[in-house]
């Protein structure tokens, strides 16, 4: 079963996970309780598409970086 990980960052201004950033992705992260895997989902918008209607590599790299940070932060406290 997946459970949402609460966003405890006070300013909520992060480009990737902040709900107060109007230009941001507003990612939400989830913990799969059995496997201890952290996941997120993002469907790209036209703003971040590159050549061939593919999500820009910088955005992809940022999402990967963000999920690594959330995983480390959440699982190691």
Image (cartoon, rainbow, N blue to C red):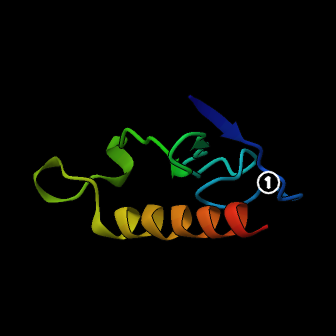
Residue reaching furthest to the right = 10
Query: Does 31 sit left or right of 14 as displayed?
Result: left
Query: Does 44 sit left or right of 52 as displayed?
Result: right
Location of the N terminus (image quadrant): top right
Q: Residues within 10 Å of mark 1 (few under 14, many from 20)?
A: some
Q: Out of 44 and 74, give the one closest to the viewer.
A: 74
Q: Out of 70 and 34, give the one closest to the viewer.
A: 34
Query: Does 54 sit left or right of 39 as displayed?
Result: left
Q: Which residue is mark 1?
A: 12
Q: Out of 47 and 66, give the one closest to the viewer.
A: 66
Q: Out of 38 and 42, give the one closest to the viewer.
A: 38
Is residue 4 depicted above or below 11 in this figure?
above
Residue 12 picture location, percent across and down: 79, 54
Is residue 64 depicted above or below 43 in this figure?
below
Location of the C terminus (image quadrant): bottom right
Residue 69 picture location, percent across and down: 60, 70
Residue 64 picture location, percent across and down: 43, 65
């Amino acid at each position: 079963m997946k459970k949402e990980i609460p966003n405890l960052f006070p300013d909520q201004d992060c480009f990737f996970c902040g709900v107060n950033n109007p230009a941001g992705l507003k990612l939400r992260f989830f913990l799969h309780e059995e496997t201890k895997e952290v996941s997120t989902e993002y469907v790209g918008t036209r703003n971040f598409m590159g050549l061939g209607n593919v999500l820009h590599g910088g955005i992809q790299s940022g999402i990967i970086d963000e999920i690594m940070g959330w995983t480390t932060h959440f699982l190691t406290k």
